[in-house]
Image: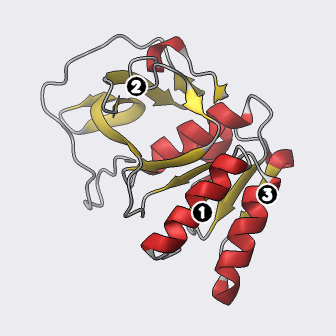
Amino acid sequence: MVFLVPSSLKAVFPYGLSKSGVLRISDSHILKALLLGIASKQGAWVAILGAKNLGWDVFFKSGLDRNRLIYVPDLDHFAPQILFAAIDGCDILLIEGIVLSQREERKVAKRARLKNTLVITTEWKTNSFLVDCNPCRVHGLCQGRGHIQEITYRVSSRYGDSFVAFNESGWDFDCKKQEPRKTLKASSSKKLMVVR
């Protein structure tokens, strides 16, 4: 069972986005929004656990349905109970800031496969499928002046790479594959911040 992905992401997810197990992603805010939006548009219940300081506008423009969303920013001492309850009741989970032992990770992965729930995380020590996302081109700037109109991202997995773009309207899955002149890095500069 899989979530269908846009054809431009078939190189990264040739069989679709799995509906069960664990998906480890790079610490990319934009990739989290992309994957949760894909699942949410297909009717999935989404739980975001332990994540703070989210840019909700990016998530909602990515297709996240507010009516099928559970958000628990602070889990305190109840992390395992909340995590297993979310696995039992939701289709896809994004977990952040939850430190699990390798034994606990195996339990979570087994429970997720049993309940047909996809767990997305950046912090996972045991084997899992890895997906990375990096900005590669900013449109709308000329020599550091202007307004960012669109950012093109390279999404990668062991299967291949895809290019997608995000703009004020949301995702553009039909963007042309453009090799960047140089790869951009997330910047701490006050002048330009590229969302990674």
Q: Earlier along the polypeptide chain: callout 2 or callout 3?
A: 2
In the image, what residue occupies the spot 66% across and 59% down?
Answer: 48
Q: Amino acid at mark 1?
A: Val
The percent coordinates of residue 28 (x first, y second) are: 41, 50
The percent coordinates of residue 83 (x first, y second) are: 68, 68
In the image, what residue occupies the spot 62% across and 45% down?
Answer: 59
Q: Which residue is mark 2?
A: 12
Query: In the figure, 27 relative to 37: above or below?
Result: below
Q: Earlier along the polypeptide chain: callout 2 or callout 1?
A: 2
Placement of the N terminus among the 4 image quadrants? top right
Judged left or right of residue 144, residue 168 is right
Q: Which residue is mark 1?
A: 108
Q: Which residue is mark 3?
A: 88
Circle 2 SS class: loop
Q: Are marks 2 and 3 in contact (CB under 8 Å)?
A: no
Judged left or right of residue 149, residue 120 is right
Q: Amino acid at mark 3?
A: Asp
